[in-house]
């Protein structure tokens, strides 16, 4: 669906996921890849809509959240329920050393699920 985006590494956890996406600058010649601080609005929100740059990380995340929310709500028979947190965490990987470190973190994340701060049995810092 998004020819300029490649899913490089990912892991799906019980209540979140981690992933590395690569944005192909040859296909995305506008270099419109930056986030603009917007994720999907709350369903009942009266907040003004912020337009997103096409082919940006924020438009990718909004589309992903929208599509998966619709499918999850069909499966659960819970129309219009929120599924995702309001935003997402992003980080630009600038070199091979950082890429290797983050890939290892993603690959090893399931092994430390019991100690994860997002595990429902652990106190959250939020």
Image (cartoon, helix red, strand yellow):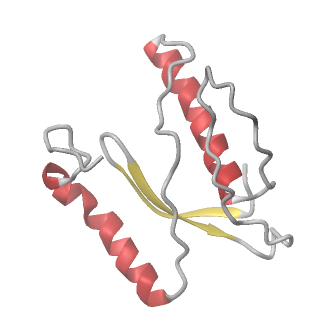
Above or below, 58 against 40 in this view is below
**How many labels, in total?**
0
Residue occupying image coordinates x 26% and y 46%: 118
Q: Is residue 99 left or right of residue 74?
A: left
Picture coordinates of residue 98 (x, y %)? 43, 83
Q: Residue furthest right?
A: 30
Residue 64 in the image, given as x and y percentages of width and height? 60, 42
Residue ID at (72%, 59%): 56
Residue 29's x, y, as percent? 85, 72
| Direction from residue 119 to residue 84 in the image, left or right | right
* Above or below, comparing residue 77 to residue 9 in the picture: above
Task: Give the percent coordinates (x, y) of residue 19.
Answer: 47, 60
Q: Quadrant of residue 57?
A: bottom right
Q: Please say if 116 is above or below 22.
A: above
Residue 111 shown left or right of residue 80 in the figure: left
Residue 109 occupies quadrant: bottom left
The residue at the point 32 percent across, 47 percent down is 13
Residue at 61% x, 48% y is: 61
Between residue 36 and residue 113, name the one nearer to us. Answer: 36
């Amino acid at each position: 669906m998004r020819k300029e985006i490649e899913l490089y590494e990912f892991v799906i956890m019980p209540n979140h996921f981690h992933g590395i996406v690569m944005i192909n600058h040859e296909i995305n010649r506008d270099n419109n890849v930056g986030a603009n601080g917007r994720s999907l609005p709350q369903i009942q929100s009266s907040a003004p809509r912020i337009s997103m740059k096409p082919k940006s990380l924020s438009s990718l995340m909004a589309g992903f959240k929208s599509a998966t929310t619709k499918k999850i709500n069909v499966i659960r028979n819970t129309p219009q329920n929120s599924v995702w947190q309001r935003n997402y965490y992003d980080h630009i990987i600038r070199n091979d050393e950082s890429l290797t470190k983050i890939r290892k973190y993603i690959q090893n994340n399931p092994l430390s699920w019991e100690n994860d701060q997002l595990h429902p049995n652990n106190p959250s810092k939020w």
